[in-house]
Image (tube, rainbow, N blue to C red):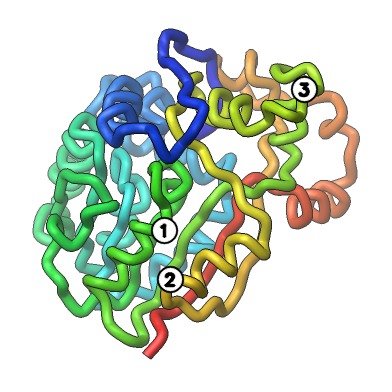
Amino acid sequence: CRPDRGDHGITIMTSANTVPIEAVRQYWNQRPCNIRHSTQPVGTREYFDEVEQRKYFVEPHIPVFAQFERWNGKNVLEIGCGIGTDTLNFARHGARVTAVDVSENSLQLARRRAQVYGLEDRARFFHGDAERLSEIVPPDPYDLVYSFGMIHHTPHPERVLQEIRRVTGPGTHLKIMVYHRYAWKVLWILLKYGKGRFWRLSDWVARYSEAQTGCPVTYTYSRRQCREMLEQNGFQVTGIRVEHIFPYRIADYVEHRYVKEWYFRWMPEALFQGLEHRCGWHLCADAEVKG
C-alpha cells in the first residue's frame, strides 16, 4: 500500500507472535489495500481501471515481477489478493486463478472486479487465514504461488510457507514480496516517527508501514533472512532483488497529484534507480518447491 493520511485507533502489539489473526482481519477489513486509489464510485469499471493505473504507475516493477503473460493456461494460487488488481491481471492473461484473503471486505471487491470484467470463470476466491491454507484451498497442481505483500503481515510467516508446501508439488514456482529491512522507508519512519529511537524500530515500522496506521504485524527481512526463511521451509531460491522507493510527497499524493520530494526531484534517474535496487522497500524473491 502507498502512504496516505493515517487512521488512528488500532493498538500496536509489541510481539507479532502474540497477535491474533482476528486483529489482522479487522485491520484489513477497515481499509483494504489500495481502496482509495480512485475517486470514481467504488465497484465500477472506472474505479477499478483507475486503481490499477495508479497502482502500477507508482509500482511499475509489479508487472515485471509477476510476469502475468507467462502464466497463460497455468494454475495460479494468489495468497493475499486484496481487492484483486494482480488477480485479474493473471486472469485476463489466461491464467486460472485461485485467490485467498483474510479480509471479507477485500474479497467482496475482488469478486465484484471479476464480474465487472467478465472473468468470473477464470478466478475463484476463498476467505481464510493463510496460516491454515491447506484447509481452505484444494491441492491443485499449481504452477505458480504468488504473494505480493502479505506474508510479512501474518503473525507466523513460516506457517504460511509450510502450508504452501502442503498444497503444491515439486517444481511449483513461488513469487513473494516481503518488506526489506534495509530500506529507505525504514530510515524515513525511524527519523520521522521514531525520532531516532532505533531500539523501538520494529514498533515504528509496524505502526507506519501502511496507509492506515497501526498495522498489527509487519516483519522486515534482509536478503539473507529472506533466503534462509524460504530455504528452511523447503524452497530453492532462484533470485532475490530489491525494488521500489516511493518518491512522492504524501500530502499531494492523497490528492492524486504526483509531486516528488525535493531530494528526489533533482536526483538523476540512474542514481534513483540504483538507490532503489539497494534501499527499496520491496524484497522480491523467486523460488521453486524442492523435489
Say above or below: 286 vs 211: below
Q: How many marks?
A: 3
The residue where tag 2 is placed is 233
Which residue is found at the position 46% from the left and 25% from the top? 13
Q: Position of residue 22 (x, y in %)?
A: 25, 30
Distance from label 1 to label 2 (Cα)? 7 Å
Which residue is found at the position 70% from the left and 35% from the top? 185
The residue closer to the viewer here, 175 or 228, is 228
Distance from label 3 to label 1 (Cα)? 29 Å
Which residue is found at the position 58% from the left and 55% from the top? 61
Which residue is found at the position 78% from the left and 55% from the top? 278
- Which label sits on residue 158? 1
Q: Residues within 10 Å of mark 1 (few under 14, many from 20)?
A: some
Residue 32 is drawn in which quadrant?
Answer: top left
- Which label sits on residue 289? none
Kindly give the residue lying farthest to the top in the view shown.
9
Quarter of the figure that contains the C terminus:
bottom left
Apparent side of residue 195 relative to residue 50 in the rendered image (left or right):
right
> Which of the two discs, 3 and 2, labels the residue nearer the N terminus?
3
Q: Residues within 10 Å of mark 2 (few under 14, many from 20)?
A: some
- Which element carries disc 3, helix, strand or loop? loop
Say above or below: 96 vs 112: below
